[in-house]
Amino acid sequence: MRFGQEGACPMHEVVTRQEWLARRKAHLAKEKELTRAQDALAAERRALPWVRIEKDYRFEAPQGPVGLTDLFGRHSQLIVQHFMFGPDWEEGCVGCSFMADHVEPAFRHLDHHDVAFAAVSRTSLAKIQAFRRRMGWTFRWVSSLNSDFNFDFDVSFTEDDRERGDVYYNYAPQPYVCDELPGISVFHKDAEGQVFHTYSTYARGDERLVGAYNFLDLTPFGRNENGPNGDLRDWVRHHDRYEAAGASTCACHQEPVPA
């Protein structure tokens, strides 16, 4: 079934309330098992070793040049969204925008839990500011256009990468699909101001931060990503473009993001 088809309904098993309850309880046991496994995995994630950041990364911000330490503000923990927005793109990636739409409601709580958030993109500050105004976002977003930051964290790629046809992404060699790819990186700043890289996740690893997916995964039709791309590009738009018809696009020519 596709949305918008009047009267369309997928064939599905219909049972009595008693049988439904028995099946639901059996599924609940699996859900609890997954919850406990996720808790254990999160504990392992927090126990991973850290890497000291030795390079003095500099970014362009509205107030002028800033360093990685400045992105923490008063906090000791920092989440960075590697937001796909290449130097020659006219707007930010649809998928990254989808995730960014979830940031500000969460940050009201993160801000009181010693966690800062910033987006970083390898495009000009002027383009970032214009797109942020269009989308109505207020979170911190800086330009890494003149920095090694994106390249060092394996989310931006060079002409040499394009010509060679492969890149290092998500901790493995991948076919080249785009000059920018998404990710999340996490950092800690100690009392002396030293910064440590604690975690990064790429590709589908950032889905846990997309609240809309968690809602959709509870529904009968789920994510309903059954179009030609088989992912969010089949339906997600920039939030100011949902009234427009047609499939969503991104500056990366709708190439698939490596898994």
Image (cartoon, rainbow, N blue to C red):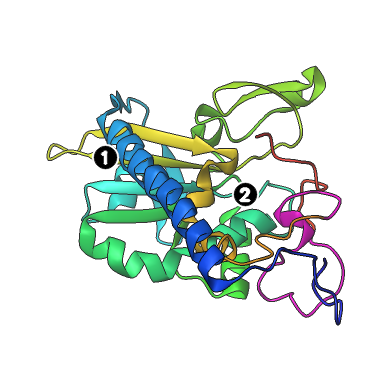
Which residue shows up at 63% across the image and 60% down it?
127
Which residue shows up at 29% across the image and 50% down it?
72
Q: In which quarter of the image is residue 25?
A: bottom left
CA–CA distance in space, label 1 to label 2: 25 Å
Q: Mark 2 points at which residue?
A: 123
Which residue shows up at 82% across the image and 67% down it?
2
Q: What residue range appears in magenta?
A: 227-248
Circle 2 SS class: loop
The answer to whether 157 is drawn above or below residue 217 in the figure is above
Kind of residue at disc 2: Thr
- Would residue 230 be counted in the magenta stretch? yes
Q: Name the residue under label 1.
A: 188
Picture mark count? 2
Residue 128 in the image, given as x and y percentages of width and height: 58, 60
Q: Is residue 53 visible?
A: yes
Magenta segment main secondary structure: loop
Q: Which part of the image, by quadrant, shows the N terminus?
A: bottom right
The answer to whether 28 is drawn above or below residue 174 in the figure is below
Q: Is residue 92 visible?
A: no
Which residue shows up at 49% across the image and 65% down it?
21
Q: Which part of the image, by quadrant, shows the C terminus?
A: top right
Circle 1 SS class: strand
Residue 84 in the image, given as x and y percentages of width and height: 63, 48
